[in-house]
Amino acid sequence: MDELGAPKRQRWQEALVLAVVAAEAIAGVVFATSSIELWRAGLTLVLGGALLLRHRHWRWLLPVLLVLNTAAMSVSVLIIVVYCFATRSHYRLLTLLIAVLAVSSGAVSSLIWTGTSLYLGLTGLVVSTLIVAASAATGMYTSTRRALLSQLQQRAEQAESGRTVAEEQARRAERTRIAREMHDIVAHKISLVALQAGALEVNPNLDRAQVQQSAALIRQTATTALSELREVLGVLRGDGEEAPLAPQPTWEDVRRLVITSQDAGISVDLFDFIDDPVPDPLARTAYRVVQEGLTNIHKHALHTKARVALIGEPGTELVIEVSNVLPKGFMTDLPGARMGLSGIETRVTHAGGTIASGPTDDGRFEVRAVIPWPTAT
């Protein structure tokens, strides 16, 4: 049965039921003094065999067996029937009615087979009542215990399943976060490397000093990117529980991003109207926004003019604008991860701000982020 805490069919229980009923029937045959007692022993065996069907048809079979047991007068059948019904029924009223039926059948059996003696009749009634009460109480206790254990097991399975789902969601979120971190770290610097290498490629007439300067800049940029990537991968492998995801930029690093792009040959102007110290969490978010905006300019708008504007003060908002003139006919072979804008949108939203990107009416492509700037306490 599929009911919560319902007993399961087990072979040893079936064998035990048949053994108990058969033992009573054999005892009745051995000590039989008349054909009626032999007939009762045979009926006891039949009722014992019918008990094997109790798992599927217990609702109507067990009450019928109680009525038929009035003729067989089997104590083992009486006990088993009451106990089995009590373990299966979730309605105590039905169990009480079955108990009353069992006591009545036992009393009637006593009156039929022992005569009309008042003493014997009362004795049979008391004995039947005690047997039925003990069987019903044991059956209800067993039913309650099975239901409780089943509920506890079900809750444990649900908790385990919920924990597994939560762990999987946490792993996915962490993988996504690390992927975005790797994109932020690597994409900007690799785009600079590609830009610097492209400048060497299209300018074969550079003198030795310029070539050395460009090569040194490429080496320094690639080394920094590799070092930062190793630190991120170290966290991913679990090399250090307290290892931070590098880099952890400050506000000076935001300004340095523009200078690095200018050194790489990008025509980008910085409009910095920030005079107050910027909190590190806010600076890190601003760094990622500016970094992603410049990375996209390196990839898709190399030959256009760009600008970075930083405006705000404590208690208001920090406004970050990274824009460039829309290129005409320029294509790039640098691949796009298609994660950058999504990544910084998540960061800005998590910081309580808003971000928008797209073409403007004056022929530019703009990334504009507005982030709350809390007052220092």
Image (cartoon, grey):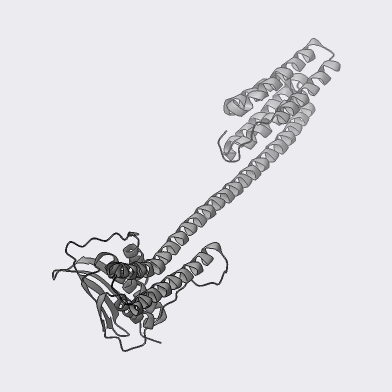
Who's the residue at 56% across and 52% down the image? 160
Q: Which one is nearer the viewer's eye here, 317 or 360?
A: 360
Q: Position of residue 364 (x, y in %)?
A: 18, 69
Give the answer, above or below, for where 107 lies relative to 156: above
Q: Which one is nearer the viewer's eye here, 86 or 323?
A: 323
Who's the residue at 39% across and 64% down the image? 183
Q: Position of residue 8 (x, y in %)?
A: 64, 34
Q: Position of residue 154 (x, y in %)?
A: 57, 47
Side (left or right) of 9 relative to 175? right
Q: Which one is nearer the viewer's eye here, 282 or 245?
A: 245
Q: Which one is nearer the viewer's eye here, 74 or 199?
A: 199
Q: How many marks?
A: 0
Give the answer, above or below, for where 245 lies relative to 317: above
Whether residue 122 can be seen here: yes
Who's the residue at 74% across and 36% down the image? 130
Q: Quadrant of residue 266?
A: bottom left
Q: Quadrant of residue 64?
A: top right
Give the answer, above or below, for where 15 lies relative to 96: above
